[in-house]
Amino acid sequence: MPLIHNFNSGPSILPKQVLEQAAAAIHDFNHSELSILEIGHRTSLFQDVLDEAVASLKELMELDQEHEVLFLHGGASTQFFQVPMNILDDSGSAAYLDCGTWGTKAIKEARLFGRVDVVASSKDRNYTYIPKDYRIPPDATYFHYTTNNTIEGTQVHDIPQTPVPLIADMSSDILSRVMDFNRFDLIYAGAQKNIGAAGVNAVIINKRILGKVSRRLPSMMDYRNHLENGSMLNTPPVFAIYVCMLTLRWLKEQGGVAAIEKINDAKARLLYDTLDALPVFRPKVDRADRSRMNVVFVIDQPELDAAFQEACKANGMVAIRGHRSVGGFRASLYNALPLSSVQALTELMRYFAQKNG
Amino acid sequence: MPLIHNFNSGPSILPKQVLEQAAAAIHDFNHSELSILEIGHRTSLFQDVLDEAVASLKELMELDQEHEVLFLHGGASTQFFQVPMNILDDSGSAAYLDCGTWGTKAIKEARLFGRVDVVASSKDRNYTYIPKDYRIPPDATYFHYTTNNTIEGTQVHDIPQTPVPLIADMSSDILSRVMDFNRFDLIYAGAQKNIGAAGVNAVIINKRILGKVSRRLPSMMDYRNHLENGSMLNTPPVFAIYVCMLTLRWLKEQGGVAAIEKINDAKARLLYDTLDALPVFRPKVDRADRSRMNVVFVIDQPELDAAFQEACKANGMVAIRGHRSVGGFRASLYNALPLSSVQALTELMRYFAQKNG
């Protein structure tokens, strides 16, 4: 039986120690003789978990006093509409960058609440690059973009310069690289890549952008209610937040974001260098815009696709396949994936290229 | 160290076998050599989990072909607004029964979307009874009520007779007693009492009530999108759904809803009989409307409150306390709580009454 290498795009690999601690807490949480699944959310037992998760995220992101952290239900897909519902007035106009599947979905939802100005799109070349020359109107209510395109394999490497409030979907690259997170007014990210397991979102907010729309909001959709209630407006997803807390604790033990970025760089460089060197494989996106989290590539001879899939499977490489909407191959290299898994994959690629070159 | 008796009101006690299976799946799910927290949601591994959870819920509730089952994010509190957003047109009027904290919250959210006709309220006596003589207007878009009031300890024992579509929040008594669930057009329930762990909702829908409002809905709020995508419009809360699947499997092994209802009846009868027999304690709600899930009571001599809390704690009785909004005491007797825990509690009560009588 080969060692398993988990290249899943999300839900994805978690650190072994997180899995061990999570399983132990299902038997007995913190010597309470209760399972983490059975404790009340309004106990100090859980409040300590939530407090640590919030504090760790603030510390890892080096957030200033103006930024607050929420853990919310609903996935990033709920944020696609919750953001404009809270921030974009009927008479306002929001600027969006369209560089992939998730950005397109975010734009669709924003149009329910106000005008949307798509400042640039890379749809013309199937989202294989990041548009560079675009202008964000200075009177836009906010500018929204996706920092990393999980499906297409592109990444926005620099934070756009703009005086308008900055909002980003960072689901698939949050905590993978050092960024000045304080430049953002709102950041959201599904937990199931670099923060924890599926079932919860992290939302980071600068309160100054709230309270400016005139529409009435459902209680559960109003960020202000969640801020006032410290992410406990209703029963939170207790276990999912616990896994976040453990994963953030692990990341701090690794040395934080700067330390993990070095490893992420080494992983991505090794994989892209291998793809560039082997004529059988071809990375799909523009070199300058390559994602360090999701490496998307193809084999130019489609008759080899099945053989490569088979070779991956035989060698314990899980989920080396493109998203069902784009086909081809993808290897996701999130924080918890060790360099050794990328070494194993690139060795397999070299062997495969030699055999089929 | 005493044996633990978990009377939590939710998140609450789960069957021991569910906890053991959940912990094992965090180490290795179904011999995949991956954790349940690390598998892709669009794999057959997870599809099988979701399919079994849906099939088990349909079987346990004896749902007919017209009723579909969804597992959604956001807690029952999201349903408070998602229901009227999908079903109540601006020009329509919905009938609501106001018999407790959760019903009151549901009414508040419905008012954002149309007119609300509160057909009856038990607020006059602090929600200690269920109103009986009320009229549901035959032209109401729907009638909504809470089947069991977790906080106040009352329960609606009979399904109201009405020709209009029937909608119920069953968060705290779903699957605890036999009901004709097919009489409802929409049922919702947070999982963290009788279905599984916190982090997911069950929503049961008769599709005939959908598609009748004119407003545009955010994609994630439109039940039709979730139905079309089989609860996988976006990344679902994988682990929470897995715990539901295990808990529903356990309930089937117990003999289903009819079998568990007998045990639930025995538990509630024993506790209420004890409270009625001991002058120290007093059940707070009208006898006819007592909940079999959440038994709410007080001690008439407030100076004994702390001593009883202390006695409970010393004997491993967890969470024998009223909701922070009402005070007093509450013991929640969900499906997974064994009769032996109620026996232990009532023995303690008799001992306490004798000492303090």
Image: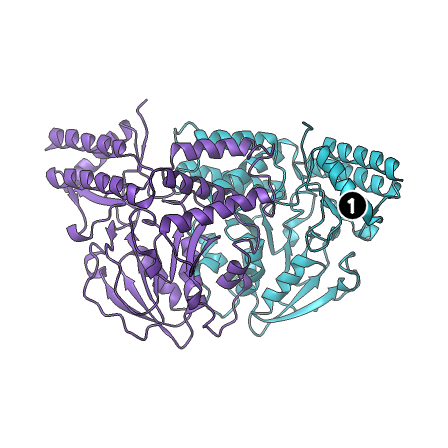
Chain colours: A cyan, B purple
In the rendered image, the quadrant that contains the C terminus of chain B is top left
What residue is pinned by disc 1? A305
Q: Secondary structure at mark 1?
A: helix
Can residue B249 be seen here? The reply is: yes
Q: Is residue A245 left or right of residue B293?
A: right
Q: Check disc 1: other Cα within 10 Å, few if <14, some if 14-19, many if 20+.
A: some
Q: Quadrant of residue A166?
A: bottom right
- Residue A95, compared with residue A171, is above or below; it is below
The residue lying toward the viewer, choosing from B285 and B174, is: B174
Q: Is residue B113 left or right of residue B181?
A: right
- Residue B62 on image: x %, y %: 36, 52
The residue lying toward the viewer, choosing from B339 and B80, is: B339
User: What residue appears at the point 29 percent right and 48 percent down from the top-left corner?
Assistant: B177
- Residue A276 on image: x %, y %: 86, 43
In the rendered image, the quadrant that contains the N terminus of chain B is top left
Task: Please report, as a chain letter, where disc 1 is located.
Answer: A
Hey, which residue is sitting farthest top in the picture? Answer: B1
- Residue A1, compared with residue B41, is above or below; it is above
User: What residue appears at the point 26 percent right and 70 percent down from the top-left corner?
Assistant: B136
The residue lying toward the viewer, choosing from B200 and B232, is: B232
Amino acid type shown at disc 1: Asp
Hey, which residue is sitting farthest front in the picture? Answer: B65
User: What residue appears at the point 49 percent right and 32 percent down from the top-left corner?
Assistant: B23
Q: Is residue B345 left or right of residue B276?
A: right
